[in-house]
Amino acid sequence: MTINILFAALEARWPQYERPLTAALNAAGVTDFNLSTDIAPQEVDYIVLAPNGPVQDFSPYTRCKAVLNLWAGVEDVVSNPTLTQPLARMVDHGLTQGMVEWVTGHVLRHHLGMDTHIHGQDGVWRKVNPPLAQDRPVTILGLGALGTACAEALVALGFDVTGWSRSAKDVPGVRCLNGESGLRQALGTAQILVLLLPKTPETENLLNAQKLALMPEGAFIVNPGRGPLIDDQALLEALDSGHIAHATLDVFRVEPLPPEHPYWAHPSVTVTPHVASETREDTASEVIAENIRRSEAGEPLLHLVDRDLGY
């Protein structure tokens, strides 16, 4: 029986995904399939979904066995009341590697004081003598697939890494903490803080004025996770006072970030346009194809979302 797979993303994405998805499905041994952007809802077996795409009401998809998200973030779909099908989020090695490279680059930038020389080309001989990585405490909030991979990369470079997560984790070489007291401890040593938590009701505004005050004077913040993790006004005030030296932000409550937003003009903020890690078509297609293969074989899906936790 032919497997009907609906590709439900923005129109511009279809030419990028049609060939790699077809190749990945064939490579996974899924050969009798119809992959299309136009399939009658009652005939759809799987939805390959971008949350900003055309499918917002899942109730007509009565035959659908699973919704396979193209994004790592699922906050825009997990609370949809019409979604009754299993939902899998995107975890793929291409996306993970991209995040590791972005986070490592910006942590090293702040650790080494690169801005002093990048922005100081005025004939003044400025020396910056950073500590060795082993003497630079870095904290990562969020030890999911992305946070763990970034923590492992920073440990490999010699950094003193603390990780915090809502549930207990064990990552070799990383001081793993959880709970409210663990969060306070993790922030208290964070000379560089990396945010890689999902957006949930519990994590929104997690980094507020009280939490920012726990961080060491002159600390740096790197946020490639979710914009709402940060109380924007509290961060701006911490930057203005100098308590936080600099914030590199890749994600925001409203995207694109409006031109009038104070982050754009603030001398201690670097804005990047949600590019920390893009989904790569080839590797993402492999993950989608493997989950369809597993489902058809009666095996459990990879990366299933826990509706109660929201990720």
Image (spheres, rainbow, N blue to C red):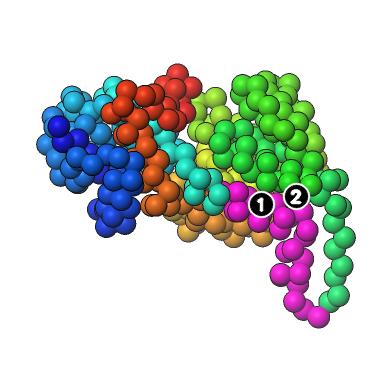
Tell me which label, 2 or 1, sits earlier in the chain.
1
Determine whether label 2 and label 1 are within 8 Å by CB. Answer: yes
Residue extending furthest bottom?
A: 123
Label 2 SS: loop
Q: How many marks?
A: 2
Task: Look at 30% across and 44% down and name the residue there.
Answer: 25
Magenta stretch bounds: 99-123
Residue 119 in the magenta stretch? The answer is yes
Q: Residue at x 75, y 50 (%)?
A: 157
Q: Quadrant of residue 195?
A: top right
Query: Is 82 rendered above or below residue 25?
Result: above
In this rendered view, identify the residue nearer to me: 180 or 149: 149
Q: Position of residue 8 (x, y in %)?
A: 26, 43
Q: Which residue is tagged 2?
A: 157
Q: Is residue 136 left or right of residue 33?
A: right
x then y, percent, for residue 304: 42, 27
Q: Amino acid at mark 2?
A: Leu
- The x and y percentages for residue 268 are 68, 56
Q: Point out which mark residue 104 bears.
A: 1
Q: Which mark is residue 291?
A: none
SS at mark 1 in the image: helix
Image quadrant of residue 310? top left
